[in-house]
Image (tube, grey):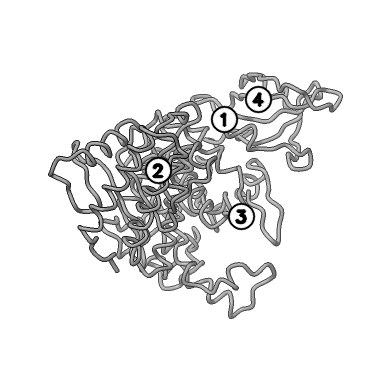
Amino acid sequence: MRSNPVNIDLMKKFVQTLAGAAQSLRLYPRSHPLVSRQTDLCAQHLSELLVDRTSLRLGLADGVLFCEDYLFNESNPALAEMARLLQALKLEGLELRAGAGPREIEEFLVLAHEGGWQAAGLEQALAERGIRHVLPLRKPSTQEPPRAVFRHALAVAEHICQEVVLGRTPSTTEAGTAVRGMVESTLGNPNALFALTLIKDYDNYTFQHSVNVAVIAIAVGRACEVAEEDLHILGMGGLLHDLGKLKVDIGIINKPGRLTHEEFEEIKKHPEHGAQLVARMQSIPPQVVDIVRGHHLHYNRRGYPGDLIGRPLSPLVDMAAIADSFDAMTTLRAYRRPVSPRQAGREMRRVAGTLLHPDFLDRFLAFLGPYPVGTAVRLAGGEIALVISVGSVARQDLGLRVLYDRAGQKLAVPQERELAATDLDQVVGEVDPFLLGIDLEEHLAQ
């Protein structure tokens, strides 16, 4: 189901008042009553525009301002103000979502005017100010910080879920932009984006699991040396793989204990629900639908759904299944503690050849290296360190951050250390970072 067409006259009023608010903040202090009047009126127009849709897109195409499918070919000061604002922020556009009130609009415009976002990045500055309904739109690139790429993908995953809940067909363009950023980031720096999948936000599990599986699936594909086009398919399949769970009773999805037979039968329907949803999206490759439908089929094809058994499927399905398993194992569940990336690799090897594709798994684990990013290790001298990077060529080369000295005392200032493949015997064991209270986000989100 598509969103209804935008009311053009109302949309023009909204753009006019948004531009007026931006201009007011350039001319007057924030406390000036004209500023609040403009932002109040702007939020009112936006609320009216979003009565029957979840978001509105405003941006520049070849230097021409557009809102949704409408191009502003005329010339006036308000349009010039909006174009100036987007160009100053180096954005292709803005996505304004339902719930964007006067405060968020004003905060966004103040941030844009003050320019204090450059140091930390726009996405981080927006998050720090609690701006959740005014989102930047731009093509991510390898120069974009991995954290910004990841945060953008999370926002896209959340919006896709909102669209499905409201009975709408998600935007393929929006998902494609997020996936393109993840692929480019992974090709540019394979460690950084993967490290972010290990920082678990349990309150945001639904969206983060989708993004994690997309990132890890891209890593599996890279390890298996697939073409870049297939990396995009893996990322899209990972991002959308669990969409069908939105059609399953939330009480079953969130049940902490063992599922009954009837409840598990309901869970088993989610791949088919998801495949039907994804197939309705524009220009979705059939391999993406295969991933969504077949990510629980297993390598031996004895999983579910049963009606896929015997059908030819893209090999990308087995790569995405490895990513789904890896993220599930390294995530806290009601029925089990998370395991480290290295432990996950050992457990996955036990089901290689039955649940998981053995060759693809071997390649992925070799790509991660013997001590993957996020593994806490004890060194021969007694120190405890966290693996924060592995070599881009020799995957046995490690970048370490030493956190505890040989006496077990936490270092006030962690020490960086490089460990070549020839010196791996300096690692004498693995330790549990959770028992030591090691904050992965502190060390991996940099």
Q: Nearer the viewer, mark 4 or mark 2?
A: 2
Q: Quadrant of the N terminus?
A: bottom left
Label 2, residues with CA under 10 Å away: few <14, some 14-19, many ≥20: many
Q: Earlier in the sequence, mark 2 or mark 1?
A: 2
Q: Secondary structure at mark 3?
A: helix
Q: Which residue is mark 3?
A: 203
Q: Using residue 432 as the reference point, say whether residue 388 is left or right of it.
A: left
Gap between marks 2 and 1 measured at Cα: 37 Å
Q: Using residue 132 as the reference point, say whether residue 284 is left or right of it.
A: left
Label 1, residues with CA under 10 Å away: few <14, some 14-19, many ≥20: few
| Marks 2 and 1 in Cβ contact (< 8 Å) | no
Q: Which residue is mark 4?
A: 400
| Marks 4 and 2 in Cβ contact (< 8 Å) | no
Q: Position of residue 314 (x, y in %)?
A: 36, 55
Q: Which residue is mark 2?
A: 35
Amino acid type at circle 4 is: Leu
Q: Nearer the viewer, mark 4 or mark 3?
A: 3
Q: Earlier in the sequence, mark 4 or mark 3?
A: 3
Q: Earlier in the sequence, mark 1 or mark 3?
A: 3
Amino acid type at circle 3 is: Asp
Q: Which residue is mark 1?
A: 446
Gap between marks 4 and 3 measured at Cα: 29 Å
Gap between marks 3 and 2 measured at Cα: 36 Å
